[in-house]
Amino acid sequence: GPTPLPLLGIFFSVDTAQPWLTFNTWRSTYGDIIYARLLNKPVIVINSEEVAKDLFEGRSHIYSDRPKSILYEPFAVDFNIVYHALQLRSAHKMLFSFLQDPDNYSSHFQTCILSFMLTTVYDYELKAKEDRIVDSMIRYADLVIESLAPGPTALMETFPFLLQLPSWFPGATFKRASVKCIQAGYDTQELPFQNIRERMVNYPINRGSKTDEPYSLRAAQRRACTFLLLMFFLSLVVSETTTFTLHVFLLAMVLNPEVQAKAQAEIDRVVGKDRLPDFDDRLSLPYLDAVLRETLRWYPVAPFGIPHATTTSDIYKDCLIPKGLAMTHDEKKYPSPNEFKPERFLHEDGSLTSDTMPLGFGWGRRACVGRHVADTSLWIAITSFLAVFSAHKALDEHGMDIPVVPKFSTGIVIHPEKFPLRIVPRFPDTSARTLMQLTGLGPYMDTTWGIMRLIYQ
């Protein structure tokens, strides 16, 4: 690997906003396995899918630990669940939002994913367009992502005493941001918990023996708090990364209209126009699956990968991997990586290849625990959108296409910056009435927070 500077290591050699780009450049010089020292933390970078699979899957018993981190510990969750009916309903509700306000696409995608997660975890029905729980979760997620940016994170890991500085200390912006993030986290957790407590009072659980009631109730409360806390963090992680991936999908459709047309033709051929796609159609829509896989590959929203740590020292291809070293990886397997080509995941006969894009979720026992939730949520959202709408470049005052130059945010999780586009129904007769017929959802006058709105559920 590169020669480190005393104390600082490779800190000034790495683009701390986009470190994966630096690691990718180093691959041609140092190979698929790179050793580096980032400040006081030794790191091994895996730059090859082959090596990552060999280590994280073939030797997962020693490569599945997590590196200790003073910043990441609160964000780990080990849970996964999938509810297709709820995901389908959330995607259908999203279609009404796009019909009513196509310009606010970011909010519609985010609401779609959060609606499913809140219903699944808290049995909370998202009704109002401006929902206090949703707004709070979005604000907290933004603060978490900002706080875990690679540059500040490296400084905190190297000099943990900085976290002990008072928030008023000159230059301690990171501490003020941390305090703000922690407070937002408490507030965000409390809102859905409060909703559940109120419903438990109004609809008490039918308990068994009264002699067991005090113990059972206390135990149930402890289990419920632990479970809901885990679910809270899972909801945040899945909703943010899934929403950002949908932004990438929309950008890809605007830049690659031929891909969009081909995907829509497959939907029309398999599903028809008298109903909307559902999960039973997935095996018959291989090109849609290829579009999803290519979306995950083209611009992964977590390009820094999932950190791993070894539980014991290991030798791989004459390289010593010491115990406890953190690892990350990025993909370099696919030719013409900057091109959006779903066909790379298809055989010549149109069937899907065996490459399910594990790069998007990690390998082995430390793979993303929400990968199945994210996969099915992404698939139904993308397929439902393409069945009803098309995304195109925005037009200027002369009716000409406005060029789109992809720009991405920086940090541990990235997303496309807002770009001009227009979202239009595919068919001229598309209306709220036709969507009600296709989805089975009906209009509902919501008065949440004292404001009257027409929604569909």
Image: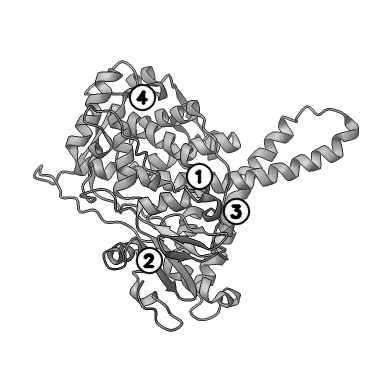
- The amino acid pointed to by label 4 is Leu
Q: Which mark is residue 134?
A: 1
Position of residue 202 measured from the top left corner of the image (x, y, whole percent): 72, 32
In the picture, measured across the screen, residue 349 lies left or right of residue 187, that is: left
Q: Secondary structure at mark 4?
A: helix
Question: In this orientation, which residue lies closer to the viewer: 327 or 21?
Answer: 327
Viewer-side label of 4, 2: 2
The picture places residue 147, in percent across and down from the top left corner, at: 48, 63
Q: Earlier in the sequence, mark 3 or mark 2?
A: 2
**Quarter assignment of residue 303:** bottom left
Q: Residue at x 58, y 61 (%)?
A: 182
- Residue 449 vs 164, above or below: the answer is above
Q: Is residue 310 left or right of residue 406?
A: right
Q: Nearer the viewer, mark 4 or mark 1?
A: 4
| Res 389 visible | yes
Asked which secondary structure carries label 2, the reply is strand
**Residue 283 - label:** 4
Residue with the mark numbered 3: 187
Residue placed under numbered mark 2 in the picture:
34
- The answer to the question of whether label 3 and label 2 lie on touching residues, with beta carbons closer than 8 A, is no
User: Distance of mark 4 from mark 1, alpha carbons?
Assistant: 33 Å
